Each structure stands twice: as C-alpha cells, then as structure tokens.
Amino acid sequence: MNFTLNVWRQKGPNDQGRIQTVQATGISPDMSFLEMLDVVNQGLIGKGEEPIAFDHDCREGICGMCSLVINGIPHGPRKMLPDGKREAKTTCQTYMRDFKDGETLFIEPFRAKAFPIIKDLVVNRSAFDRIIQSGGYVTANTGGAPDGNDILIPKHDQERAMDAAACIGCGACVAACKNASAMLFVAAKVSHLGTLPQGQPERAERVIRMVEKMDAEGFGNCTNYYECEAACPKEISAGFIAQMNRDYLWATAQGEKQEAKGGAG
C-alpha cells in the first residue's frame, strides 16, 4: 500500500510550523499507524532528513501516549461495528488496512492551549499530571495492608468506579472539543475516587481543587457537544461530567455553610 502523508512539522514550541508532504510506500496493510510512521522515518533518516517526532510508549492501547489527529479525528477514523457503535481505539490500534490504498492522510498533533507543542506531533500534556496532583489521592492509614473484604462496596458502585478508572489520560477529549475542555478527563478522575468509600474523606476538597486547577491550566468550558465522549478510546461516559458538576455544587455549598458557621461563631 502507498500513501501520501501531509504531516505537521514544527521544530519547537516557538517555531511557526508547517505541513510537509511525505510519501509512504510499500506499507503492509497489517502495520499499525505507528509502525507505518516508523517505516517513513527510516526512509527520511536514510536520506539524511529529520525524522518525524511522535509520541508513543506501550503501543497496546494502554498508555494513551499516541496522541495524533488523523484526518481531523483524534486517534483516527473509526469503523462502524455491527451493533451500530463506532469502534473505540487509540492511534496505535489503528491499522493501515483501515485506509484505502493511495489515500492522502493528514496527520497533526492534539491542538489545545493547555497542550503546547514540543516538536512535530509531540505535545506537552503535563497539565493533566498537575490536575491529578491537585486532588487525585485518598487518605490511607500507614501500617499493614487491610483485608480486602473489610470494606464492602456495592456492585453498582464498584462497576461505575471501574468505568471511570478506565480513562488513560490520552487527551483525545480535549483535542475533540471545540473549547479544548478537559471536563471528561477530570470528571473521570473525580468520579473514580468519589464513588468508592476510600475516596470519601477528600471528596469535597478533591473536586474543588481539581476543577480549579483545570481552569487555571487554561482548558475551556464544557458546552455539551459530546465530542469528548465520541472521541474517547475507552468510551468514558459524559455522564461522569454531570456527576462531577453535582459534586462540585455540593462541595461549594458545604464550603459556604462552613464559612457561615465560622462567621457566626
């Protein structure tokens, strides 16, 4: 298979950037999209040219590092499944057989103010790390590990927490949103811990800190376009955003009550 690649090239954060046209020839249909880029880079290096910088790690759809926009879609186009849903996958799980021989592909980085470009297709997503650091933890008594059966968790809560925990922090939700909102990511992290008994001591403080940190990092607001849910490779439900909003309103109300009590005293 042969492809024409229109790839975003940018030497650094302060470079203007441009689209470069590169030919990908002799590509096996069984190659993943990242393996195809490996082959292209080998050709560029062989010609003494700068290889295309792109992010990757596990290449198994687990780490979320393969943050590419392919033909305008974060992680690439998705096929329709027999059940009427679109397949959920990351870039590294996208195979060249998903495209037509001779097709022209546009490859760009995730674009958001809070995700500054480092080089070519690589963006800095450390804003996500700082959001997690602001409140993504639970109180734990030191000492021996408690028996796993000591805290009974209802099946519905356990499954909902696991659904939220499936988020891999890839940033596709931000790239897909016209506002570059990180609400789905933050909601997944807040709901994961806020649903479990172990996460209750910091529940109010957590949601306030993480939402405020999200805003401080420069992410946009959610306007309910649901593009985040459609682009998510782990199919995180936008319903978690509603849950986070409820927690945030409850937490701020509780805070106002505490302030009122303090003032009255």
Image (cartoon, helix red, strand yellow):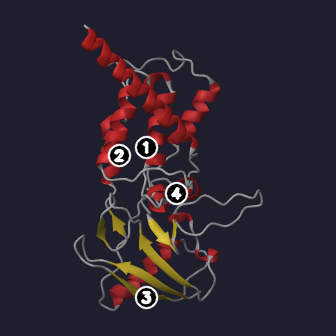
Q: Looking at the picture, does residue 161 appear above or below residue 261? A: below
Vertical order, 167 against 105 (above or below) = above
Which picture quadrant has residue 97? bottom right
For residue 70, which numbered disc appears in the image?
Answer: none
Q: Which residue is mark 2?
A: 214
Spatial separation of the CA atoms under disc 3 and disc 1:
37 Å
| Residue at screen point 31% across, 60% down | 124
Outermost residue, top side: 265
Can you say which quadrant of the picture contains the N terminus? bottom right
**Three-letter amino acid code at the position of disc 3:** Val
Observer-nearest of 83 and 66: 83
Which of labels 2 and 4 is toward the front?
A: 2
Residue bearing the label numbered 1: 186
The residue lying toward the viewer, choosing from 58 and 211, is 211
Residue type at the position of mark 4: Gly
| Amino acid type at image mark 2 | Met
Q: Nearer the viewer, mark 3 or mark 1?
A: 1
Q: CA distance from mark 4 to mark 3?
A: 26 Å
Mark 3 vs mark 2, CA separation in Å: 37 Å
Q: Are marks 1 and 2 in contact (CB under 8 Å)?
A: yes
Looking at the picture, how far across and down is residue 34, in whole percent? 47, 71
Horizontal and vertical percent position of residue 263: 25, 14
Q: Are marks 3 and 2 in contact (CB under 8 Å)?
A: no
